[in-house]
Image (tube, coloured by chain):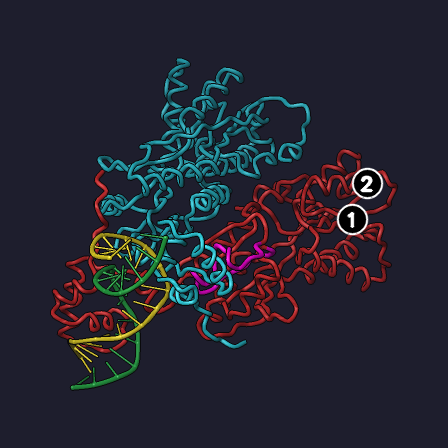
Chain colours: A cyan, B red, C green, D yellow
Amino acid sequence: MSRGKKSSVTIRDVARKANVSVATVSRYINGTARVSDEVAKRLDRVMEELNYVPHSTARRLATKKTNTIGLLLTDMSGDFFAPLLRGIESMAREKGYDLLISSAREAYSQVRNLPLGPHNCDGILVFTTSLDDGCLQALSEMSFPVVLIHRSTPPELNIPCVTVENKAASYKLVSHLIEEHERQRIVFLRGPKGHEDSYWREMGYKQALLDHGIPLDESLISFGEFFRRKAYQSMWELLSGGVQFDGVFAGDDEAAVGVLVALREAGVRVPEEVSVVGFDDQRMSPYLQPPLTTVRAPTEDVGKEAVRQLVKLIQIGEADPLTLLPTEIVLRRSCGCEFGSGSPLYETW
Amino acid sequence: MSRGKKSSVTIRDVARKANVSVATVSRYINGTARVSDEVAKRLDRVMEELNYVPHSTARRLATKKTNTIGLLLTDMSGDFFAPLLRGIESMAREKGYDLLISSAREAYSQVRNLPLGPHNCDGILVFTTSLDDGCLQALSEMSFPVVLIHRSTPPELNIPCVTVENKAASYKLVSHLIEEHERQRIVFLRGPKGHEDSYWREMGYKQALLDHGIPLDESLISFGEFFRRKAYQSMWELLSGGVQFDGVFAGDDEAAVGVLVALREAGVRVPEEVSVVGFDDQRMSPYLQPPLTTVRAPTEDVGKEAVRQLVKLIQIGEADPLTLLPTEIVLRRSCGCEFGSGSPLYETW
DNA sequence: CTGAAAGCGCTTACAG
DNA sequence: CTGAAAGCGCTTACAG
């Protein structure tokens, strides 16, 4: 229980004991210049004996590099978060960077107050809206490396971004409803205002209608906010407003839950009368009644790719402006497709 | 797109511009001594003008503190992870610490290779088995602050630990099966070998049997490994071995999924013939067929409490040896309880 | 291949 | 209340 100092063997100690200068030790450790074999051996031995670990803070101060990347998030609930972080963490480790993470309820607007920035990272990953445009601009002006995840760069700023194919997947999903299940009046529930993913999903929805010669009916577009209750409410409004529809693209799986509940309460059968589809393939989605047709995004890969781009940006000063990862449709019963097994339990083994 | 240096205004710059010494600036910033009002004002203005941000690396080197805590994990899948991290992150921020995280496939055994340690943190949080006993001992010997999460301290080591009440909850759960649903032959599926949580759940199971005068039958204890497939296999072995049972405590919710599938395939009705209960209350659990009776742990609080203890350890050199957070039983239909609503969709709103 | 020395940007006794 | 100066543990021109 004693609080003694952490042992601190310094580079000086090993230099002395190995009878060389600290410069030599430093060079040997960093492989920054050759040393004679004899010295190398001696150093290996001495470092082993002394159990020497270079002091990373001192190294940072001397090199002006932190070897750390930061991740800035708005919130860490949702199934989304774990795989994303897993991807980020594994790639960061692979690239030799420490990972600092910070979550903020609201977007930061003052660069000076950022928990993550030039003072403790070599670059940061910004997830969705965790940083406002002003901050991005300020960081950009000081040439601080930033990569955006699931959010595109503000105009004129040229910040690299990595995200997934929302539009193409939505297009396929809605086309599926039209072509396979003969749906014509498909509701779309928007996500939160300003949410990139939602925007592109809406574009995919509209494009699919257009390409199938179905006129866009604004009364079929409502708000789900990627949130169960809101989607539930919106469905009731549509229902009691007498709006006719035979399909619902809920925007995401969370909203789809609200849709399913509302329809069940209203006595509308899914998928017989109305097809319902979501987006994200959350862990609960195979277990919903009926199992939810949705879209799966390669979230872990998004994380990895984001780190890869950030490291490029840090090390060579440039990265790909946009990385779009492919998504895949997951067909289950809520759209009207039939499956033999019946048990969604199997699926996730 | 230029790569220019990050602007770096130093304490020296503000000192010069404000016509004081760097020592004064430092003291003012850290509130470590009073300065005259006049100087204070000048400093505020100058720092604002220069957009000065103290260089945390330099500060670290000078103070020998990193103001960072580390989190070491084995894996980051599972519903468990997000709330835990949320708790940790929020409390770390509240306490003024940066959070570094690192995940390892296997436990580290060499202190020198640790991604997180005295070189980059003031203390670390160790989740379950991410560090072996040898490492813990080494860290302990150098008085490096460590707090364990969901893992108790190795003998003689006295490392503070925070976890949840596994035994009491299991006891209540099994007692519920016995008392309310008249179950007598209850299977228990163990988690991974050496897993603390599993151990205590087993103790709760055994104690409940004992207190209700039900003799322990070893043939009812098998392996679920907190893993669907394994639990599924084990159930089939019991089933085809002709073992009679009327209840299953699956060890956790993952295993419960395997149990439900096996029983369904075998034509055994749940809960009429066999009650099934899990542990953890995963997000999918309300949606299982039937909805799963289980136990909910305050995972976010575990994270917060762990940080609180670690910070105490860092700052005043001591912490509570054991923090046990209470768990709560969540009754649904898989145990045999009846509920009006029927729709599990409501529950998680 | 190796050393002496300056410097990274702070903090903190020590002295006033 | 304020300053001059040493020191935190490294890295890296510069010189040999």
**Above-or-below relation of B175 to B63:** above
Q: Residue B120 placed where, x, y %?
A: 42, 59
Image quadrant in which you'd find residue B340: top right
State the mark number for residue A204: none
Dot 2: element: helix
Q: Which residues are magenta?
A: B108-129
CA distance separating discs 1 and 2: 9 Å
Split into 4 quadrants, where in the image is the N terminus of chain B? top left
Q: Which residue is mark 2?
A: B237
**Above-or-below relation of A240 to B220:** above
Q: Is residue B123 magenta?
A: yes
Q: Residue B249 placed where, x, y %?
A: 74, 50
Packing grade of label 2 (10 A; few <14, some 14-19, many >=20) is few
Check disc 1 and give the amino acid type: Ser
Q: Residue placed at 68% from the left, 59% from the top? A: B169
Q: Residue B279 placed where, x, y %?
A: 66, 51
Check disc 2 and give the amino acid type: Glu
Q: Which residue is mark 1?
A: B222
**Extreme-top residue of the structure:** A213
User: Mark 2, chain letter?
Assistant: B
Towards the viewer: B106 or A250:
B106
The mark that comes first in sequence, 1 or 2, is 1
Q: Is residue B76 left or right of residue A211?
A: right
